Image (spheres, rainbow, N blue to C red):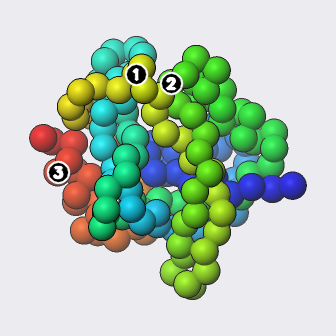
Amino acid sequence: MDQWYFAYGSNLSKEQMEERIGSSREARVAWLTGYRLVFNKRSKKDGTGKANIVPAAGATVWGVVYRCSYDDLQKMDKCEGVKGGHYQRHAIRVQLDSGEELDAVTYVAGERFLAAESLKPSTEYLETIITGARQHRLPDDYIRSIEALAGS
């Protein structure tokens, strides 16, 4: 049975998702209320910031839900380092423009990889997120907020 996966970071990129799980899947713009985007997950490669979401009253994280098979999600678990504790899969509920709500899963950074404060993402990583956000036509003000957040 298929499951919706909510992407909010570099997996917004159509090219990255195709590399990770194969040919393109159904994708729909969605948002998650009560959370905010942060770059507080330390990269295992170079110590730069990776995207994560944290609970925050009144905040919204925009992203994309992809329809994924069980096998797709197993591949995503591997890419996101679930076995090593880098990210964990969490059940969430997202909203669509149509007013519809969907049950989905997303990845939240594991505690042992969190920095005490925000980290600067690499330029390449940030460009991947912004390119994906533009590909899916996420709101311009949200894209600007990602750029500003990453620069702090």
Residue at horizontal 60%, vertical 74%? Answer: 101
Horizontal relation, residue 107 to residue 51: left or right: right
Query: Label 2 belongs to which residue?
Result: 86
| Residue 120 in view here | no
Q: Residues within 10 Å of mark 3 (few under 14, many from 20)?
A: few
Instruction: Check the picture and name the quadrant holding the N terminus.
Output: bottom right
* Residue in the foreground of this view, choosing between 75 and 84: 84
Residue at horizontal 81%, vertical 44%? Answer: 70
Query: Label 3 belongs to which residue?
Result: 148
Q: Residues within 10 Å of mark 1 (few under 14, many from 20)?
A: some
Spatial CA span between label 3 and label 2: 25 Å
Quarter of the rendering containing residue 2 = bottom right
Query: Label 1 belongs to which residue?
Result: 113
Q: Residues within 10 Å of mark 2 (few under 14, many from 20)?
A: many
Horizontal relation, residue 22 to residue 65: left or right: right
Give the residue type that dot 1 points to. Answer: Phe
